[in-house]
Amino acid sequence: MPHELNNPCAPSVLAELRAGTHSLHVALEKRLPFFSDRLDLPLYRRLLAAYFGFYQAIEHSLQCSAWVPPGFDLHARLKTPALEQDLQALNINPQTLALCPSLPALHSQASVLGVLYVLEGATLGGNVLRKQVAEHLALDAHNGCAFLYVYGEATGRNWKSFLDFLNAVPLDAQARTQAVEAACSTFSCFEQWLERQEVLL
Ligand code: HEM
């Protein structure tokens, strides 16, 4: 329904993504061990290795996808390089690590946007987590904690420019539903992968 794209009363895709993923975010946040007494260097190393297995796979699938909306600078937003830097600092060879085999389907621009919403939004919480890791494990961007602060002081700016991009892509109701499904699937695939890697509480 093309007229709906211009309807100012239609819910924004951001509002739908937030509402659709809120409970998944809360559930995963509770299971991640960043604020647990169990967080020590060995667990942090296993956690980062598990993060790598997911991010490497999903970013590779995004890079191979024909559905990344034109104008989105995927390369500038990749987080795998920061994870590789952290793994190297922690003496882990990324080539020895397992990669997540089960990923959200990328079958439309809307589904790519849903995935990107989760990966970009995760940088906001990352800023909270890196302070915790700095305090408890004495790690910073140079010795194993670059990923959690991947955008540094540009975190807020990058989030805002992502939201501007997201809001500028015309999405009808069906496309917005696809975006939310892909975002939910990203959370679920990530949580299941972390579960299998035995790094969750
Ligand atoms: C213990 C782990 C986590 C904590 C403490 C956390 C915390 C936060 C916080 C505080 C925000 C809001 C920041 C703001 O509004 O400025 C946020 C946003 C977000 N986080 Fe997390 N997060 C965690 C893990 C994750 C993970 C693993 C993902 C996905 C892989 C994720 C995805 C998101 C998304 C998509 C948003 C954006 C929500 C929106 O404003 O639309 N978070 N997180």
Image: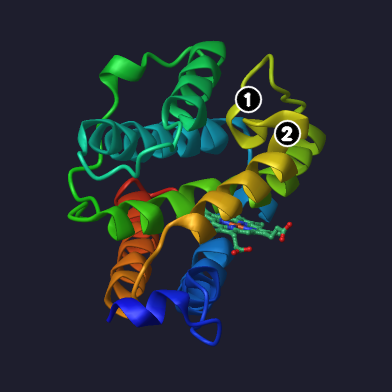
Disc 2 target residue: 154
Which picture quadrant has residue 188? bottom left
Q: Eyeballing the image, is 145 above or below 125?
A: above
Badge 1: few (under 14), some or many (20 or more) residues near its Cα, within 10 Å?
A: many
Disc 1 target residue: 146
Q: Eyeballing the image, is 200 above or below 27?
A: above
Q: Residue at x 53, y 38 (%)?
A: 43
Q: Which one is earlier in the sequence, the residue at label 2 or at label 1? A: 1
For the residue pair 48 and 159, the one nearer the viewer reads as 159
| Ligand 1 is within 8 Å of the C-beta of the residue at disc 1 | no
Residue 170 bears which disc, if any? none
Task: Find residue 172 and report its horizontal and vertical position in percent.
Answer: 34, 74
Q: Eyeballing the image, is 142 above or below 201?
A: above
Q: Residue at x 28, y 69 (%)?
A: 178
For the residue pair 22 and 179, the one nearer the viewer reads as 179
| Residue furthest right in the image | 135
Q: Tell which quarter ligand 1 is in.
A: bottom right
Q: Is residue 53 left or right of residue 48?
A: left
Query: What element does badge 2 sit on?
Result: helix
